[in-house]
Amino acid sequence: MENTAPLTSWTLLVLTCLTGLEAAGPPGDGGGWSLKSDLRLQDEGLCNIDVLDGSSLSHQQFLERYAFVRPVILRGLTDNTRFRSSCSRSRLLQEYGGKNVRLSTANTHSYRKVDVPLQEYVDVWLRPQSADVLGSAPSSVVPIEDANLQIQNYILYFFGDNNVTEWQLLLQQYASPPYVLPRTSGALSFGIAGPGSGVPFHWHGPGFSEVIYGRKRWFLYPPDQEPHFHPNRTTLSWVTETYPQLPEAEAPQECTISPGEVLYFPDRWWHATLNLETSVFISTFLG
C-alpha cells in the first residue's frame, strides 16, 4: 500500500481514447463501472496511515490503539463478495435504475439536493470532474427538468440519502465491519461517484468507509488541526492548488483505499475524499 510518490502537482492521464464500457466480470475489473473514456486520476499519493490485516487486530486492540486516537485501514475484515456482485453496474441498474436517488452538492455542508432517477444519474451525470467546477448548486432543490442545465457548473454527488425501504434489500447484504464503539450503533450510507469527485473537508462522528469498486483517496487531520480550505471548492481543486504547497508540518494523514479495504476515522477528525476513478462505496457511521 505504501506509495512514495513526491508531492507534486496533480496529474490527469488519459488511459485510452476508446469509448464504451468495460465488460463486467470479477470484482477486480471494476464491476462494469469503469469507462474506457474516463480521465483517470492516477496519483494515489502517499500512504502514511497504518494498513493492517483485520485478522491481526483484536477488538480490544482496535479500541486501545485506534478507535479514539487515529485512523487505520483494515483489510479482510468481512467477506462482501455477494454485496459487491449486487453492486455491479448491470445488476444495480436492473434493480434500481428507475428509482429516484437524492444527490447532494459536493461542498462541505451538502445542503442542496437534487432528485433524479439512478439511470439518469449514471448515464448523464457520472462523468469525470475538473478542478475548476464548484461544489455547490444555486438552489435548494433543482427540478429534474432543470437538472441538465446545472450539471456543467456544479458537482452533484450520490451518497447517503437513500430511501431506506427501497434500498433495504441491497443494504442488508452488506457485512459491516465487526468492530464497534461503546454506546454506538451503525447507519449505512451508500454511494456512486465519478473520477475527480469527492467531498471537501468536514467532520462528524466516527465511522468506517469501504470501497466496493474503484479507488478513493482520503485526506485526514486531527480535530485540533483544522485544514485550510474553501468550503465551496472541491477536493480536486484543493489537491491541485493547495496540497502541493503545504509545509511538512501541515501535511495531512492520507492514503488511497481500494476494493476490500476499510478505512476507520475517529470522532471529529477532519476528512476529505477524492475518487480516483468511477467508484462505488459504502460507509458505516457510528452514532
Image (cartoon, helix red, strand yellow):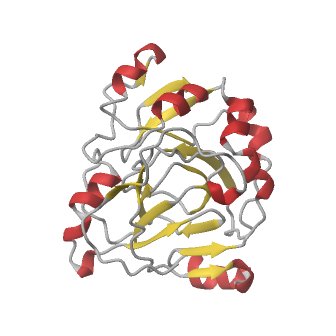
Residue 70 in sight from this viewpoint: yes
| Foreground residue among 36 and 3 | 36
Q: Residue at x 40, y 16 (%)?
A: 146
* Quadrant (top left/top right/bottom left/bottom right) for the C terminus: bottom right
Q: Where is residue 273 in the image (x, y as percent from the top left)?
A: 43, 57
Q: Residue at x 49, y 39 (%)?
A: 19
Q: In the image, is residue 272 above or below residue 232?
A: below
Residue projecting furthest to the top:
145
Q: Position of residue 104 (x, y in %)?
A: 46, 36
Q: In the image, is residue 265 above or below residue 274?
A: below
In the drawing, does residue 56 fall left or right of residue 218?
A: right
Give the quarter of the image for residue 101. Answer: top right
| Foreground residue among 44 and 107 | 44
Q: In the image, is residue 209 above or below residue 140?
A: below
In the drawing, does residue 44 fall left or right of residue 265?
A: left
Q: Residue at x 42, y 68 (%)?
A: 44
Q: Where is residue 148 in the image (x, y as percent from the top left)?
A: 40, 21
In the drawing, does residue 18 fall left or right of residue 235?
A: right
Q: Disc count in the image? A: 0
Q: Where is residue 135 in the image (x, y as percent from the top left)?
A: 33, 41
Q: Residue at x 64, y 56 (%)?
A: 29
Residue 284 in sight from this viewpoint: no
